[in-house]
Amino acid sequence: MSDERLLELLAEAKRLAKEYRALTGRPLGVTGEVAEYEVARLLEVELSPVRQAGYDAIRESPTGTERLQIKGRCLLPGAKRSQQIGGIKLNNEWDVVLLVLLDETFEATAIYEADRPAIEAALLAPGSKARNERGALAVSKFKSIGRRIWP
């Protein structure tokens, strides 16, 4: 499949997801796929095979190959400030988590990166059942322990 055709399909998926939310008030469930594609396109990393446990892409760095777990979050105007990202499983193999923030049209607005030690420290800190048991972090917490890498 050509890159041009892939871009066309992604644009259509974004349009359908936006229309679905407008009609139902519910997400269509394509945020993760859109986030993965945006990382591959914007950061030029290689996506892993589908259903690869623990990570979604790989990239080469000065220290070797890094396994990237990609999380996406669509931030809607007027939404609660304490939005959570999907669960991060510490028992899987990965080195870095990338958080792709999308606007209401599913366009990437920012990409943040946090390494495994920072994520582990945040997830294992005492206090929150959602954080400790489900591996869920608030977007604001992820931004505070990570760094913005795009744009």
Image (spheres, rainbow, N blue to C red):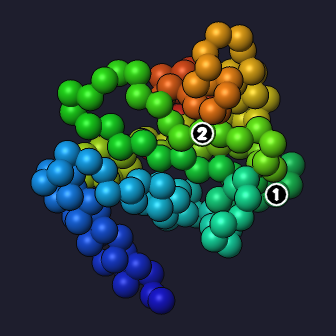
Q: Nearer the viewer, residue 20 or 149?
A: 20
> For the view shown, which residue lies furthest in the bottom direction?
1
Q: Which residue is mark 1?
A: 65
Residue drawn at x 55%, y 63% is: 40
Q: Position of residue 122 (x, y in %)?
A: 68, 21
Find residue 87 and name its label.
2
Find residue 11 and name its label.
none
| Amino acid at the residue labelled 2 | Gly
Can residue 85 be seen from the camera position used here? yes
Quadrant of res 133: top right
Q: Are marks 2 and 1 in contact (CB under 8 Å)?
A: no
| Amino acid at the residue labelled 1 | Thr
- Of the numbered discs 2 and 1, the one sitting upstream in the chain is 1
Q: Nearer the viewer, residue 140 or 66?
A: 140
Number of numbered discs overlaid on the protein picture: 2
Q: Residues within 10 Å of mark 2 (few under 14, many from 20)?
A: some
Q: Position of residue 75 (x, y in %)?
A: 33, 37
Q: Secondary structure at mark 2?
A: loop
Image position of 118 (left or right of 15): right
Nearer to us of marks 2 and 1 is 2
Image position of 99 (left or right of 15): right
Q: Secondary structure at mark 1?
A: strand
